[in-house]
Image (tube, rainbow, N blue to C red):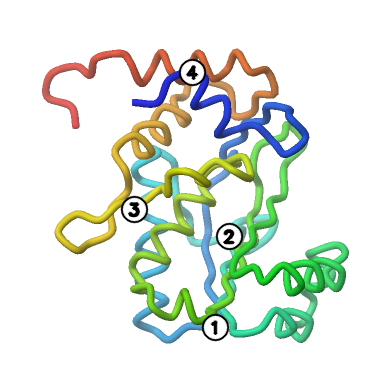
Amino acid sequence: MPKADDIRAMFTRAGGNYLFARWGRPVVPVVFGVDAATLATVKGAAEAVVTLAGHQMAETDPELGANLMIFFFREWQELLEVPNLDRMIEGLGDLVARLESAGANQYRVFRFDAAGAIRACFAFVRMDAALDEVPAETIALSQAVQMILLWGETAFAGHPPLASARGVAVMRPEVAALIRAAYDPVLPAVADDASHALRLAARLAAPRPEGTA
């Protein structure tokens, strides 16, 4: 299991500050740019990770309708043609230009409530040649893991969140355990003090009661 220093690094922003946030409301996903089979796969992965966290899904968000919007496309420029997306994503044109220049194939934008908990997430996945070779189930699970918490930009730079078990993509046990710990109701939904990582580490180190998964 990751130690406190490892956990601290996973929630450290590019500027060096620690910032942790989890969802403060039920997750309501909507997926664009996929067929019906892939839609079911993506929503199923989101539900599996939300359930793992002990959080909730819902049919609709009273404020936003859907609060987890996942877009699949071929070119970043396609985002500029999505109706009203520029109203939801400030500086969309500049963001698209930056991601296009970097050759990025995915990006996430989070929105937060007044307390700092996650209230919405926009996930963008550009299906380039590399992702074309990846099974839909793997992409879906990876996106679900990365939307469930506000991870630092380099959280999975050295160790991807998924591993292969008999040819099937699964969440790494330490990542799954960290997600469960992060949603412990005793812990705050938002934290900007690195000592929070110690509390997460303590929950990972604590033995589980007999008969629990």
Query: Can you identify the residue that label 2 sits on?
Result: 68
Residue 12 pos. (x, y %): 65, 32
Q: For the residue marked with disc 1, what is the amino acid? A: Gly
Task: Using the image as rendered, state which of residue 179 and residue 98 is in the foreground.
Answer: 98
Q: Sequence order check: which comes first, mark 3 or mark 4? A: 4
Are the two marked residues, 2 and 3, in contact with CB atoms closer than 8 angstroms?
no
Q: Sequence order check: which comes first, mark 3 or mark 1? A: 1
Viewed as shown, does residue 141 lie left or right of 93?
left
Look at discs 1 and 4 and give the one toward the viewer. Answer: 4
Picture quarter with the N terminus:
top left
Query: Can you identify the residue that label 4 sits on?
Result: 4
User: Could you tell me how far apart the alpha carbons at marks 2 and 3 are, in whole angstroms?
Assistant: 14 Å
Viewed as shown, does residue 202 lie left or right of 29?
left
Q: For the residue marked with disc 3, what is the amino acid? A: Ala
Label 4: how many Cα within 10 Å (few below 14, some 14–19, many 20+) = some
Q: For the residue marked with disc 4, what is the amino acid? A: Ala
Query: Can you identify the residue that label 3 sits on?
Result: 48
Label 1: how many Cα within 10 Å (few below 14, some 14–19, many 20+) = few
Query: Can you identify the residue that label 1 sits on?
Result: 33
Res 103 quadrant in image: bottom right
Above or below: residue 163 compared with residue 154: below
Viewed as shown, does residue 184 lie left or right of 71?
left
Residue 133 pos. (x, y %): 38, 78
Q: For the residue marked with disc 2, what is the amino acid? A: Leu
